[in-house]
Image (spheres, grey):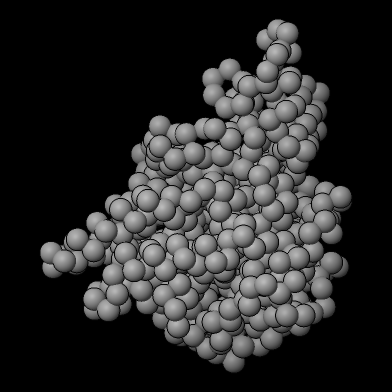
Amino acid sequence: MTLTELTAHELHDRLSRKETSAVEIARAFTQRIEAVEDSVQAYNLLTGERAMAQAEAIDAKLARGESIGALAGIPMALKDNMCTEGIPTTCSSKMLQNFVPPYNATVVERLAEAGSVVLGKLNMDEFAMGSSTENSAFKQTCNPWDLARVPGGSSGGAVASVAADEAVFSLGSDTGGSIRQPAAFCGVVGLKPTYGYVSRYGLIAFASSLDQIGPITKDVTDCALVMNTIAGHDPKDSTSAPVDTPDFTKYLVNDIKGLRVGIPQEYFGSGLEPEVAAVIKAAIAKLEELGAIVDECSMPHTEYAMPTYYLIAPAECSSNLARYDGVSYGYRTEGATDIINMFKKTRSEGFGPEVKRRIMLGTYALSSGYYDAYYLKALKVRTLIKQDFDRAFAKFDVLLSPTAPTAAFKFGEKSANPLAMYMSDICTVPANLAGIPAISVPCGFANGLPVGMHLMGKAFDEGTLLRASYTFEQNTEHHKAKPKLGVS
């Protein structure tokens, strides 16, 4: 097995035993990126010199006989909507093409303190709006399992980099499934933490009441290790929850006997591919075999999740993206005749079609005469959806569904039909509306393409999700499968 195929905990063990060095590991990933990046197109920007300097610093610590943390010397990458001091942060948008933040996001600071080696910034759907990474202003990231198919979105570059062994792990953001859906499409682990568990300070906002940063990893153990580093209260983020964080690795226990697993029938309706349904049913059977108690349940307001999301998220997007007007920072049009003309041309030229679509939807929903009918009503339905989860979790420890109703689709297959594209997130959006944690774990293949099992848990109960996911992973081989790059 090459260095680039190993997990973070496997690389840490080799570093601790001095069987390899951080510089050797960083060099291996640089070579891997050079070999496959032309095919995958995961990165917007590479920071090779900085990465090598970070690796050398870890080797110097080891040479002095100092111990290192679990993520020290481990190469990783960041979705390009997390602020990095002195390094461009673009959100894959022309609007921020030349934006260089003067500060780091809190998660970036915490990874730096942990000694992680940052390889670069990763491609995404523009301003995190999309489910396929086809909305990037710069490039089209490909699914490593089949280069003719999308990696999912909006964290497509973040997930593809891990699946293609171009990074050990990455950080993505999840507003309606943007970590979990691409994780399912590319056969890796993706966790959306409880809202408020991971600081959003320095995350360029899409929808502030829904966005959450989370880890994308090769296995569940790495997921727990990354959460140990990035989770926790941050006074710089007013939505950060003032709660204690456990050692998430304590939940990596190979035992789910008696775990109560609910199967919401509404997540298994029309639109679910039969091949995907078969894989999920096999995964459910495996959990039962391992001692879980499985039963069906109902989440009656699930059918309203998508319309609710597509009122709340665009409304918040309309507000958050109002700042991009060509005045303070970001793109500014040339040759404007007056300030109003400058506003119009800057936003017309700087934003892509999907971002404009959502700004218009949100502005309409917030406008006078429509606010009560649309936005306010959506907030009330959001409460009903959360109450569905509260009732379900009174009976069950976790809820299980497909992560996505289909496997990865081909480029262009849904881009002309926004509604069909939006339905890619039908299983993941409710967790964001309720603010609960959810994880996607590889559970099999449909027609040669990865399928993800989606587990949802109680707020701040990531531990139970990790235990269930770890047990499933330890008793299956799906997470060990690797794509053969070049198949299309």
Say above or below: 363 vs 297.
above
Q: Looking at this rendering, what residue extends furthest in the bottom direction?
A: 289
| Residue drawn where x is 56% and y is 39% of the image | 90
Q: Can residue 359 be seen in this view?
A: yes
Q: Quadrant of residue 36?
A: bottom right
Q: Is 281 on the left or on the right of 115, as rendered?
A: right
User: Where, by quadrant of the figure, is residue 293 drawn?
Assistant: bottom right
- Nearer to us in this view, 171 or 20: 20
Q: In this view, does 11 lie above or below 236?
A: below
Residue 439 placement, left or right of 107: right
Describe residue 4's horizontal placement relative to residue 450 as left or right. left
Tell me where residue 309 appears, x and y as whole percent. 71, 47
At 61% from the left and 26% from the top, the residue drawn is 331
Between 192 and 167, the residue placed more toward the observer is: 167
Q: Quadrant of the C terminus?
A: bottom right
Q: Which quadrant of the structure image shows residue 443?
A: bottom right
* Quadrant where the image shows the N terminus: bottom left
**Residue nearest the observer in this picture, 64 or 176:** 64
Residue 273's place in the image compared with 34, above or below, is: below
User: In this orientation, does residue 240 appear?
Assistant: no
Q: In the image, residue 275 lies at what x, y percent?
A: 79, 79
Q: Which residue appears at 31% of the width and 54% of the height?
A: 54
Which sits in the foreground, 235 or 130?
130
Q: Residue drawn 45% across and 62% down?
A: 30
